[in-house]
Image: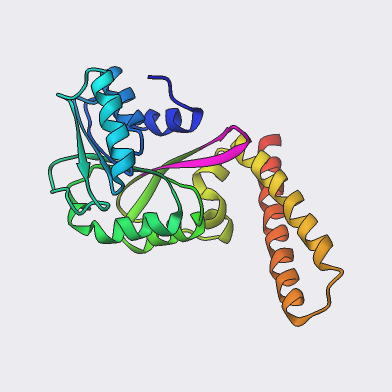
Amino acid sequence: MKLSKRLELVASFVPKGSRIADIGTDHGYVPIYLAEKGICPKAIAADIKIGPLKRAEAHIRKHGLSDRIETRFSDGFHRLEPGEADTVIIAGMGGELMIHILEDGQHMWESVREFILSPQSDLFQVRRYLEKNGFQIEDEEMVMDEGKYYTVMLVKRGNMQYETAAWYCYGKRLIEKKHPVLLSFLEKEERRISEILNNLNQQHTSGADRAKADLQQQILLIQKTRREMEEEKLK
């Protein structure tokens, strides 16, 4: 099974010997890849949508892995029991939905060794949620795949305290690593926001003024983060 760069990065966080549950498995590519590589002896591929789940079943049969990968129709963690998986993957969905899935799956929190999360939006909110609910982000990586940026987090039960808005927005671990993909993202994001600001400068309503103030704060945060990362690289 050949994975995209994004899914390959997700799979790289899974420890050898893990029993995984892939929540929102879609086509089932990650469990198939992990089983074929001998990383996972058992896996549950779960999805709330029948169509993707049937496609996953077909792919699993095609690869001769029906004895090692079980498909399960499940809304998040609803049809999973503690002890069935020690590694949980939740990827390919928005941050708000991911938070909802985690919140509804509290019965699994203590039995899961690690969560591998890749939210496609609202990363600030996801990191805040993890901090407030007894999780810690042990590692983060970032990749650009087909012109889009993706972040993957290795999360375990524990405690963390983030001190700056940049850590919530862009990831403490990524900033500490001076991650080149994050730097690329920040450069692109600054250009994008600057273009929006230029357009808003032609408007003089109270709503436009509030939007401009918010965007200017975002640019200042990006510039500060880039400057700190680039200064550290020069040391």
Q: Judge left or right: residue 197 versus residue 224.
A: right
Of residues 91 and 46, which is closer to you in this image?
A: 46
Give x and y (percent) for residue 98.
38, 54
Find residue 83 and report its image quarter. top left
Give x and y (percent) for residue 20.
24, 35
Give x and y (percent) for residue 213.
73, 71
Q: Judge left or right: residue 57 versus residue 215.
A: left
Scheme of colours in the image: rainbow
Q: Is the residue 46 above or below the residue 56 in the image?
A: below
Q: Is the residue 57 above or below the residue 76 in the image?
A: above
Residue at the spot 35% in from the left edge and 30% down from the top edge: 30
Q: Is the residue 139 above or below the residue 201 in the image?
A: above
Q: Quadrant of the C terminus?
A: top right
Q: Residue furthest right?
A: 202
Query: How many dots with numbers?
Result: 0
Find residue 63 and report its image quarter. top left
Q: Judge left or right: residue 54 versus residue 185.
A: left
Of residues 179 and 232, which is closer to you in this image?
A: 179
Q: Judge left or right: residue 48 versus residue 161.
A: left
Find residue 102 and report its image quarter. bottom left
Q: Residue furthest bottom?
A: 206
Residues in magenta, as a range:
142-154
Residue at the spot 71% in from the left edge and 42% down from the top edge: 231
Of residues 170 and 159, which is closer to you in this image?
A: 170
Of residues 176 and 24, which is closer to you in this image?
A: 24
Give x and y (percent) for residue 150.
52, 40
Q: Reply yes or no: does residue 150 show up in magenta.
A: yes
Q: Quadrant of the N terminus?
A: top left
Q: Reply yes or no: does residue 153 show up in magenta.
A: yes
Residue at the spot 30% in from the left edge and 53% down from the top edge: 158
Residue at the spot 28% in from the left edge and 39% down from the top edge: 53
Report the magenta stretch's main SS. Answer: strand
